[in-house]
Amino acid sequence: MRGEIFGELLNPALEPERYELFATSLPIAPTSHDPGSVGENGLTALAEEPLREIAPLLTRRQFCQALGAGLLVLLFRDVRALQESGGGRRTGSPSLPQEISAWLHISREGLVTVYTGKVEVGQNIRTSLTQVVAEELRVPIERIRLVMGDTDLTPFDAGTFGSRTTPTMAAHLRRVAAATRELLLDLAAEQWQVGRATVEIADGKVRHLASGRSQDIGELTRGQKLSRPLPDTVAPTPPEQWRILGASVPKVNGRAFVTGEHRYTSDLKLPGMLYGKVLRPPAFGATLVSVDTREAESMPGVLVVREGDFVGVAAPSTEQAARALAAIRAEWKTTPQPSSREIFEYLKKNPIEAQGWEGRSQHLVGSLEEGWHLAEKRFQQTYTVAYIAHAPLEPRAAVAEWKDGRLTVWTGTQRPFGVRSELARAFGLPEDRVRVIVPDTGSGYGGKHTGDAALEAARLAKAAGRPVKVVWTREEEFTWAYFRPAGVIEVRSGVKADGTITAWEFHNYNSGAAAIRTPYAIPNQHIEFHPTRSPLRQGSYRALAATANHFARETAMDELAHLVGMDPLAFRLKNLADERLRAVLEAAASRFGWGKAKPAPDRGVGLAAGFEKGGYVATCAEIAVDRTSGEVKAVRVVTAFECGAILNPDHLKNQIEGAIVMGLGGALFESIEFENGKILNPRFSRYRVPRFSDLPHIEVVLLDRRDLPSAGAGETPIVAIAPAIGNAIFHATGLRLRSLPLAPHGLKGEIKPQS
Amino acid sequence: MREVIELQVNGIRHRLEVEPNRRLLDVLREDLDLTGTKYGCGEGQCGACTVLVEGRAIRSCITPVHLVAGRPITTIEGVAHGGRLHPLQEAFLEVDALQCGYCTPGMIMSGLALLTANPDPSEDEIIRFMNGNICRCGTYGRIVRAIQRAAQKMRKENRR
Ligand code: FES
Ligand code: FES
């Protein structure tokens, strides 16, 4: 083994990954990273074994280059794990601590490869994490490659959700890269026998100024054999000195997307691969009574697989698979189920006791009785939100291959390690015989946590003895994925005539507890989340229940403001103690020109604000109502956002703009309709999503707080748009809408046509 | 019944034995391994599968392959020339008009069709023309800017 240094142990006080609310039916116990995949001499084992199968993602040459001799630095997440296993041990140790959160490798050619279990689903963390490493290691962006979401190559990671990548993974990588930088400086000083303080590092090179000596960081590691713990005190570069972080670096692999070269899971093709399809029941909960597959089986090239209620086909083309599937005659037994028309009564009538994140939770402050007593005006309202679909443009997809008793699955998921566990369980395999690889994916929005397509592809591939690809149709994606929970929210509140809120009671049924607490300073509160039965499969959706809770809260705040005759902005500011929230509210209002110009007739303005997951958001919206057609259109949206120190301003803006556009759909027209276990609108022609013509004029105001740690931003900017739009509709028409979506069929019939 | 069909894709002729009613999308992706053209809905609603036939944008997911036999087809793979990106591709990168990128090939193909028919489209014209393409990540504003920017670049190049 040539030229390896093992740096170990960085900051023990790193924040552990936590699960945010997770609401699918599948268990998600984290598993350890299997030490077996890193052999005695560390790099060699890591480099050789996966090469056979990684070909579609990385050429053999690139990968060898990346993992040839060089420097490998590991970051351990938990100091105790390290000590217990005999700290200072090398990676080859069979008792490798399980808490490795990232590793980084510098090849002799000076290429830096970073391994992280996070996945890229359009939130552009491949770029921001690259920036992090470039900044701390003082290496140009082009020299850095990220290997992401590959259970054989990357350290264990619970999943890419909850806006955790920036606060945890970016923080980990900053430390690992900063420590590596210090190690390189040590090494240079030792090799050149010069004072440590006289050595510098920049642009991928170490330099000794006095002698003019300089060497590429790759060359520096040549012929070295070193093992040393890294100090746990290495400080990352302070934001005032950032050069690459904080800059609008474009998407690092952007070119592959605009040329069509990037291969998503659904684009992969292995030799001999078949295309698979699965027979779906006509309704949720239906059971198979009988099935006749004879005709399908007689079709040339078609394989039919039947295991219990699972019936699937594999064929040499999608077309043939679809035809074979259509030829299967099946009889199902269905059961009556609630419909979307009665969903809200259903939720109220069906409480359940759930555990953990999904369980009942209560937040009590002061005494409501006292609050009612002090109130001069009382208010009570009920708000509802519908089930909606993520509808990622790339539907769920997976390619599965069995080889030598090992299963490899490429799939677009936000939880590669979770899906590995699902697969291992389903096929009775130890986890080290299963590998899950996640190519950069056609988005997720919280909707790709489960491994449904992976399981289906693996089942079919096993039976076929050949690789099989399963790509869900749009209709399957709309039906068999999971939904953002529907919910009912009841608000009761009391205010004094001067606008001070004295009592706040808030009950959420089913949508979830995310951002359920009010950010306003209210002395008496009772806030409660009530889990209920859900007729549809439900799960995470961008920002979870923060959207529902903000919709109810910020609409109620608007109603309260009108109740006491105050301006909605002034009313909020009066009840606010949180300075960061105040700052975004004021920033949005001032850019928007809140309270200045009176909008034209049939136009209205509204605002809303809140915080969640370390991000603060305020949105002002102007809408226009067409009195003849009843159509509502958002014409202008200003969002101010603050999430600590900004890593990449343009990508942050892009996320905020995207959240506004996506949020408009849920605000105005998106809603899943269902009846007796059937989705009635499972296609884009029946389920309207925002399009170009829905695009308002968007202005984003970024507040860069370099003194604060960076938080994620893929989710929170979505939470304020719906209440801002609803409040603007009220302003324009006097119509108070309390259900999301607000105007699925416009406002025809609800407002008077122009006289 | 299978038939032999000639497809002319990105300037290359292919003779294929295919089911004439198979959708063009699948033939491109599965038989020719041109996977830049995406599936998003299969009902002509999202534009992810857009390709050009004789310079005009069509939805390959609802186009039976026999309809385009012998006619010049351009897919996203045929847009860059000799490693040089088309100005519209450059513009997409310059304004970062993508997040997950899944809609991007279809957006670029539709945008190209628009720019061929109208080298100087107004914002309204872009919105109207592009309205059949869905970007679930919501990058519409950036795509409008990218098309405008490309139009400018192309006009400049033509003048030269
Ligand atoms: S896949 Fe053809 S329009 Fe959607
Ligand atoms: S960038 Fe993701 S769908 Fe457009």
Image (cartoon, coloured by chain):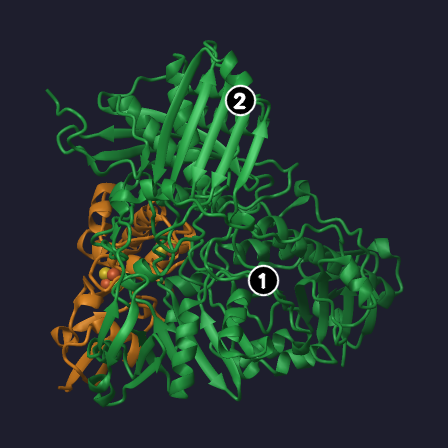
Chain colours: A green, B orange
Task: Answer left or right for B60 relative to A421.
Answer: left
Q: Is residue A449 above or below residue A523?
A: below
Quick one: label 1, few (<14), some, or many (20+) residues within 10 Å? few
Q: In this view, does B91 lie above or below B54?
A: above
Q: Which of marks 1 and 2 is nearer the N terminus?
A: 1
Q: In this view, does B31 lie above or below A301?
A: above
Q: Position of residue A53 (x, y in %)?
A: 52, 81
Quick one: label 2, few (<14), some, or many (20+) residues within 10 Å? many
Q: Which residue is drawn at 76% across and 81% down?
A: A1
Quickly name the residue at label 2. A368
Q: Position of residue B131 (x, y in %)?
A: 23, 49
Tell me the CA gap for discs 1 and 2.
39 Å
Disc 1: host chain: A
Task: Answer left or right for A530 relative to B4.
Answer: right
Q: Position of residue A621 (x, y in %)?
A: 35, 30
Q: What element carries label 1?
A: loop
Instruction: Name the image quarter holding residue A580.
Output: top right
Q: What element carries label 2?
A: helix
Q: Is mark 2 within 8 Å of ligand 2?
A: no
Q: Do the residues labelled 1 and 2 touch (CB within 8 Å)?
A: no
Looking at the image, which is closer to me, A686 or A74? A686
Asked whether residue A593 is in view, the answer is no
Splitting the image into four quadrants, where does ligand 2 fall? bottom left
The mark total stands at 2
Looking at the image, which is closer to me, A182 or A336? A336
Q: Which residue is drawn at 18% across and 66% down?
A: B62
Q: Give the amino acid type for the residue marked by disc 2 in the picture.
A: Leu
Task: Answer left or right for A626 relative to A272.
Answer: left
Quadrant of the image for the C terminus of chain A? top left
Disc 2: host chain: A
Quickly name the residue at label 1. A29
Q: Give the amino acid type for the residue marked by disc 1 in the picture.
A: Ala
